[in-house]
Image (cartoon, rainbow, N blue to C red):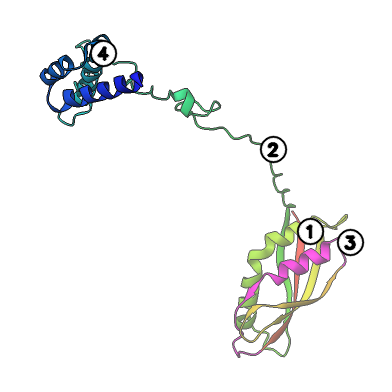
Amino acid sequence: MAHWRTFAYTFRIRQEFVIRGPGVVGNFAQAVRPRYRRRMRACLLFVLLAGCADSGASKALSPDATVSAPTFSRTGSVPSAVAPAAAPTASAVMPPSASAGAEPTVAVPDVPPLEPSKPPAPLPDVEVRNVGMHVGGGPNDNATKRPIRDAVKPHFDAMRACYAKALSPKKAETFGVDIRIPGDGGLAKISKPRTAMKGEGLAGCMVEAFEKVEFQRPRKGLPMTVSFSVEFRKK
């Protein structure tokens, strides 16, 4: 019972201290019976200490209280708590295989060097000329034959290259074909190759040379068949 009363008096004193101030607490304590004075003194000291603690805490939590900003010295030192994180170094950002200012290298497989192309074989020292021409159905005049002869002449070097395929040719050899010239001119159809020369690929090479000739349009605008022969003569 006595402890309960002591607690009640202590609670009453604390309320008076908060509401009316510390002056009232002393008057109230003097009015208490003498047998509780010792206990009340201890309680009063506890209340005073508690009140001071509450007062300090309320000032610390008051919205009007100001918080002092951290100060920094002129030396530029920064507290360790607010020091910024160190910037990443170049070695941390760049991959280990790459270096500043250097381009990545790409492995190139070894490629064998190209062999130099062989120079063309020298042409045989022979003279090529037209020795026979017959226009089927005529006319066989010079005005009709000259355009045909002029069209074939630029291909004489190709025919000399074909002559190199001949085996043991005589001093003079001939080669003849039939030429079918279209009515509009152009490339002709070559048939009936004939020669006394022997040699693998010789006839096919000569036919191919004639097939590349561009002929003029015949004067009458009609297809024309021409029997044409060339002679190869050693110099």
The quadrant holding residue 9 is: top left
Name the secondary structure under disc 3: loop
Please state which amino acid type lies under the numbered disc 2. Answer: Val
Vertical order, 227 against 202 (above or below)? below
Instruction: Between label 1 and label 2, give the one nearer the viewer.
Output: 2
**Cα gap from disc 3 to disc 2, whole angstroms:** 43 Å
* Pointer 3 or 1: first along the chain: 1
For label 2, the SS is loop
Q: For mark 1, what is the residue?
A: 163
Real-space CA distance between mark 2 and mark 4, rounded to the nearest whole angstrom:
112 Å
Badge 2 is on which residue?
111
Q: Is residue 63 magenta?
A: no
Instruction: Name the front one of labels 3 and 2.
Output: 2
Q: Nearer the viewer, residue 163 or 130?
A: 163
| Residue behind mark 4 | 36
User: x, y percentage for residue 218?
Assistant: 61, 85
Q: Is residue 209 magenta?
A: yes
Point out residue 10 in the picture as x, y percentages from the top left corner: 26, 21
Residue 196 position, x and y percent, is: 88, 66
Return the mark for residue 198: 3
Say if mark 4 contacts mark 3, CB within 8 Å.
no
Q: CA distance from mark 1 to mark 2?
A: 39 Å
Name the front one of labels 4 and 3. Answer: 4
Residue 55 drawn above or below residue 180:
above
Disc 3: CA contacts within 10 A as few (<14), some (14-19) or many (>=20): some
Q: Magenta region: which residues?
A: 196-222
- The structure residue drawn at horizontal position 43% and vertical position 23%, both measured from the top left corner, is 89
Which residue sits at x=68%, y=85%? 140
> Mark 2 near mark 4, Cβ–Cβ under 8 Å?
no
Q: From this viewpoint, is residue 11 visible?
A: yes
